[in-house]
Amino acid sequence: MNGYAPSATQSRSPPLYRASHDPTGPATLSTTVVHALADCMGVDVTDSRVSLYETVDPDALDDLFRPRYDGTPRAGGTLSFHVHGHYVRVSGAGEILIEPPARR
């Protein structure tokens, strides 16, 4: 994954996929979300089902949680959206939660 692998764990009950984004690492938040989705879906990251463009603008997602102009982190807030039936919730603290469609 070229250094962009999210730190992720998958709980068995309920089936909720968790990943975290390191804002000091080389990957953007949107890249981490795409990799987490691919892992959760069990597909290659280049699979067309993993694209965010139909749901959320990746650049806007990155900008939303980018540090403030003075360098302080934007730790508050969340953004939720659906990608191919997967409910995705991203927090300002870098937590990514993905709920597969089977749970709903």
Image: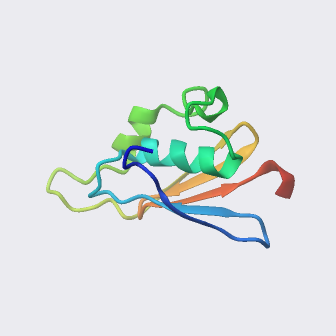
Question: In the depicted view, which residue is nearer to us: 104 or 4?
Answer: 4
Q: Position of residue 12 (x, y in %)?
A: 76, 71
Across and down, in percent, residue 67 comes to: 26, 54
- Please state if 29 lies on the left or on the right of 89 as rendered: left
Q: Can residue 80 be seen in this view?
A: no
Up-down: is 73 above or below 47? below
Q: Is residue 98 above or below residue 61?
A: below
Q: In which quarter of the image is residue 8?
A: bottom right
Position of 70 compared to 28: left or right? Answer: left
Instruction: Name the residue: 61% across, 35% down.
Output: 50
What residue is at 14 percent from the left and 56 percent from the top?
Answer: 70
Where does the image place residue 25, in percent across and percent down from the top left? 29, 55
- Colouring style: rainbow
The number of discs equals 0
* Residue at screen point 38% across, 42% down: 62
Q: Residue at x 79, y 73 (%)?
A: 13
Of residue 56 and residue 22, the one placed in the foreground of this image is 22
Location of the N terminus by quadrant is top left
Q: Compare residues 43 and 54 and report the one nearer the observer.
A: 43
Residue 53 in view here: yes
Q: Where 82 falls versus 94 (above or below)?
A: above
The answer to whether residue 28 is left or right of residue 15 is: left
Is 94 on the left-hand or right-hand side of 26? right
Can you say which quadrant of the picture contains the C terminus? Answer: bottom right
Q: Where is residue 19 in the image (x, y as percent from the top left)?
A: 53, 61
Report the residue that reaches farthest toward the left: 70
Task: Name the outermost residue toward the front.
Answer: 2
